[in-house]
Image (cartoon, rainbow, N blue to C red):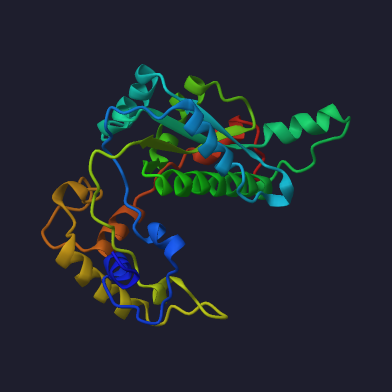
Amino acid sequence: MDAAGLLRARFGIDLPDTEVPEPIRFLLDRRVTRRYTAQDVPDSLLDGLLAAAQSAPAKSDLQQYSVIVMRDRARIKQIADWIGTMDWIATAPVFLVWCGDMRRGQRLCDRHGMPHANNNLDTFLNTAVDCTLAMAGFMAAAEAIGLGTCPISYVRSHIERVSPLLGLPDGVYPVAGLSIGWPQFRRPIAMRLPPAVVVHRERYDDSALDTAVAAYDERRRACEPVAPGGLKNNDIYPPREGVGWSENVARQLSVPERFGFAAYLKTKGFDLA
């Protein structure tokens, strides 16, 4: 598909003044992968992809993240079973759990006889950002060679189980899981909000949000309507026909999720002050 076609597939509108050089077009063609073939991902290839991930930028070169590589199918299935709605996770030959890691910095300070004076909310944010940048680098590298991936935030919904399963010590917490494998098939490209909603020039301005989102809802409804099984919080909001993207987002965000996460982080040694 040419650049214009990729942009239309991604946003549902023409963006004639947008230049997409050939080397980055694969990023516009990215699709989530939730079903995998039986073909393995060799350790040598996985190690190369992880090396690419570690090439991501890190705040002040602190490199405050770790990644747990899971290949044991029974252990991967445990996580899939805990989540309950994502049985396809168990079909992935590799499952990575990306973790924010304050512990390494604490140990380095101890090694050099200095106090670790940055156990705070900023360090928590920096560990999460370092981890996410590395995971994004891994995903881009994996998909450039034809592998499929899917990030799994739901590991944080079962953090009290995932953490001991992986032996995570104080100062280390899961940010997201990532299933990896060779795609069984390619899903359609997921339509995104128009750049005009997300990209702000010089200062933040969402004065045109309502109009832009209404048009986006219509475009998505026409090509990928919200499926009945995709409606959020049906136990609170009755299911109905014609729910658009924005209403489904509101259905999800109006109900607290993972409200025990801060309490969990405090048990893992994070101050968050």
In the rendered view, tell whether residue 247 sits above or below residue 199: above
- The outermost residue toward the front is 22
In the rendered view, tell whether residue 229 sits above or below residue 103: below
- The outermost residue toward the right is 113
- Residue at image coords 56%, 49%: 133
Instruction: Give the side of residue 96 with respect to residue 93, left or right.
Output: right
Residue 161 location (% of width, % of height): 44, 24
- The outermost residue toward the left is 241
Residue 134 location (% of width, % of height): 56, 45
Instruction: Give the side of residue 203 with respect to residue 270, left or right.
Output: left
Instruction: Give the side of residue 249 with respect to residue 231, left or right.
Output: right
Quarter of the view holding residue 50:
top right
Residue 1 location (% of width, % of height): 28, 64
58 or 5, nearer to the observer: 5
Tally of numbered discs: 0
Instruction: Give the side of residue 121 with respect to residue 174, left or right.
Output: right
- Residue at image coords 69%, 45%: 120
Q: Can residue 19 be seen in this snapshot?
A: yes
In the rendered view, tell whether residue 29 sits above or below residue 88: below
Residue 72 location (% of width, % of height): 40, 19
- Residue at image coords 68%, 31%: 103
In the rendered view, tell whether residue 32 sits above or below residue 78: below
Q: Can residue 263 be seen in this snapshot?
A: no
Quarter of the view holding residue 147:
top left
- Residue at image coords 35%, 22%: 78
